[in-house]
Image: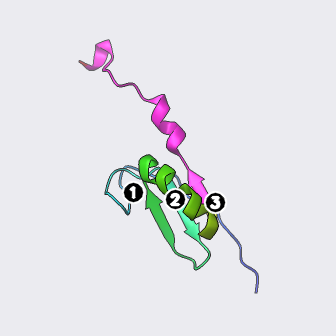
Amino acid sequence: MTTVLTPASPLTAADRCDRCGAQAYLRVVLSSGGELLFCAHHGRKFEPELKKIAVEIHDESDRLSGTSATAGEGER
């Protein structure tokens, strides 16, 4: 039997952290076939343990640094 991994679809605002319910930025694929979703905070907190059990970690937390905390002139 051959296992083929397909690329993970991008995480959206509808994907929520399994720990706290915030927007998920990490998808952890487990060897059992399941997956866990984490916000950036909990992804960093549990990273050492997750690396031990993960087949793949899809991290989109870099998207957080690309957003502005203030509204632009046309957005006010």
Q: Above or below — where is 74 with respect to 18?
A: above
- Of the numbered discs 3 and 1, the one sitting upstream in the chain is 3
> Of discs 2 and 1, which sits in the foreground?
2
Amino acid on which the number 3 mark rests in the picture: Pro
Q: Amino acid at mark 2?
A: Arg
Residues rendered magenta in the picture: 57-75
| Mark 1 lies on residue | 15
Residue 54 in sight in this render: no
* Farthest-out residue, bottom: 1
Amino acid under disc 1 = Asp
35 relative to 58, above or below: below
Res. 57 visible in picture:
yes
Badge 1, how many Cα within 10 Å: few under 14, some, many 20+? some
Residue placed under numbered mark 2 in the picture: 27
Q: Residues within 10 Å of mark 2 (few under 14, many from 20)?
A: many
Identify the residue shown where x is 35% and y is 55%: 14
Whole-number angstrom distance, CA of label 3 to CA of label 1:
17 Å
Q: Any magenta on residue 63?
A: yes
